[in-house]
Image (cartoon, grey):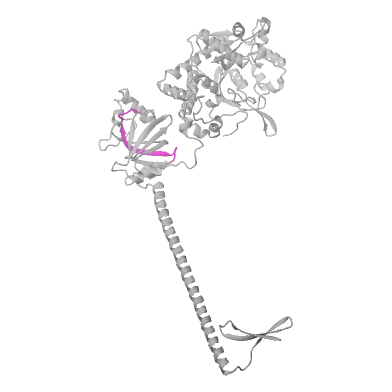
Amino acid sequence: MQMYCFTILNKFNKVQKYISIKQGFYPVFAKIIFIPSQNRLKLFRSKMENEAEKAKQEGSNISNNAEEMNEKKKEKKAKKLAEKEKKLAKKAERENLKNEAQKILEHVCEDINKDNFGYIKVSIIKKNNDKIKLYNLEEVYNALMKVDSLEGTNQKREDTTSNTVVGPELDAEHLLQKDIWVRGRIHDIRSKGSLAFIILRHKLYSMQCILDIKNNDNNKNMMKWVSNLSLECIVDINGKLIKPEIQIDSTNIKYEIHINKIYCISKTVKELPFLLKDANMKETNEEGTIKVNQDNRLNNRCIDLRTYANYSIFYLQSQICTIFKNFLLQNNFIEIHTPKLLGESSEGGANAFQINYFNQKGFLAQSPQLYKQMCINSGFDRVFEISPVFRAENSNTYRHLCEYISLDVEMTYKYDYMENVFFYDSMFKHIFNELTKCKKNELFIKTIKNQYPSEDFQWLNVTPIFTYEEAIKLLIKHDKLNLKEEEILMYDMSTDMEKELGKIVKASHHTDYYIIIHFPSALRPFYTMYKEDDPRISNSYDFFMRGEEILSGSQRINDVNLLLDNIKRFNLDATKLNFYIDSFAYSSYPHSGCGIGLERVLMLFLGLNNIRKTSLFPRDPKRLIP
């Protein structure tokens, strides 16, 4: 048995002596219990004390190192905490600055006598109504036009107690160098140093307004607020009206306002689908130009309608309806309103929208045709209607709509249906003259042509009238058609041939407007009267603009027996038309009528390339919204 002696430190740093007894393969540890000699004991004690001191020193070093490490950790942690606090302080400072900036941007004005900018309720403007008279840009434009033309001296009205203009009917000369209030949409904003330039827009009128923070009444906060206004928001601006030394080319009002106060009465809270300045750009095929495509425009029609050209288009559309209506009223017509929900299709064709009308088959009116004639048979003599009509034609062309506005006329005549043809012709020439001779309309037409360039529409005092046969022979003569004489009355002129004919007539007669009469009977509806000496030819007429049909009409059959014969000839069910046929059984004046497509007339008058441009919210086979 072998025995080894050694010392160890226990967990309490006390020295203990152990022996290792190795017996066989297994070592055994045991605490030594013996009584050594005195010298050996002293030596051992000394050694133990040294070892204990050394262990104590090592323990102390470890403790000191641990404390040192703890101190370093604390210092590092404190440093990190200080950095974090510094960052938080900076963040808080930035947040405060941001909040202050946001407060400036969201500044709400409660009193226009104290604040010169901010968001404001109209009611606050209203409170100051005794001091403030708001103008829109149209009123400013009209007044300044009087200045430029040296007119307006008979409408003088000015506040003698202040510099502020107080009446919408005042002499235009007194607008200049005065503080006025105007309201409009922000079309564009650009900042340059201490200046901000705002283009204000209303309808088709635009005006430049300038904010200069060097002005003592303005400040940097006002500049920040103005620079962050969203496009298309509506603002009220107060400032001095000035005639600039350098002419302004970017607006149609050639004067500017130097801003004293500006308030936003309605924000734009949603991002615009496209910029109005892009949508106002001239339509061109040049590469590199910004274009807003048609679908994007129509999908966001409310924004698209804000363009100068679109406002002008629909102003002129309104003018056409007004001129049309007034002309007819002055000629003893009465306006009627016929139903659009029908039990049978009005034209007897397949192009009618069918609906479920309380478990009955119903149709949307393709035209007011049957009801116009029933009104004539009721003794109304002369009637007209302006109303929507519906055509279920799956035509995705530039000239077709599934819903459009029809201008319908029906009237009696004394001797010959051509009396009415000449009347309709005079009506159209009256519309053309009224559209072009009005000075205000000139501005609208010019605005449209700035965006959609086209040749001016031309017409003659005496309108060219061709028979259908003569029109076809013109096409044959100019090598546009190859038909034999006997094939002419069997030929249905296509849209392309109509355009070719328009070019021929323009070249030979110098007009975009003409009439074709006597179409083949087979090409006209069942209620159309035919020539007595040649039933193959109908007493019908179409009017054309720039080679496209805009009016279709005819003498109507007013004899009940002839009407029944024609209904059979067209293979129609007379029982479904009894309500209409019966109106002729009690006698009927000789009469004729026509239907006119409003959108097509306007499109062709302006030389536009798509009928959707003249339809407020167009409906075609692919579009049912907005």
Q: Position of residue 287 (x, y in %)?
A: 51, 26
Residue 351 part of the magenta segment: no
Place residue 200 in its image quadrant. Answer: top left
Q: Quadrant of residue 210?
A: top left
Residue 13 vertical position relative to residue 603 in the rendered view, above or below:
below
Q: Name the residue located 37 percent from the left edge and 47 percent from the top edge.
A: 110
- Count all numbered tags in the image, as a single digit: 0
In depth, the one of 317 and 540 nearer the eye is 317
The x, y position of residue 317, in whole percent, is 49, 24
Q: Residue 414: percent from the left, percent from the top?
A: 56, 10
In the drawing, does residue 179 fall left or right of residue 532? left
> Which quarter of the rendering shows the N terminus?
bottom right
Q: Position of residue 228 (x, y in %)?
A: 41, 43
**Residue that protrudes farthest toward the right in the picture:** 24
Residue 132 visible in image: no
Given residues 475 and 430, the one toward you in this image is: 475
Task: State the quadrant of the C terminus.
Answer: top right
Q: Nearer the viewer, residue 520 or 231?
A: 231
Regarding residue 87, the answer to whether it shows in the image is yes
Quadrant hosting residue 521: top right
Outermost left residue: 160
Compared with residue 38, is residue 134 higher up or lower down, i.e. above or below?
Answer: above
User: What span is colored magenta in the figure?
Assistant: 230-247
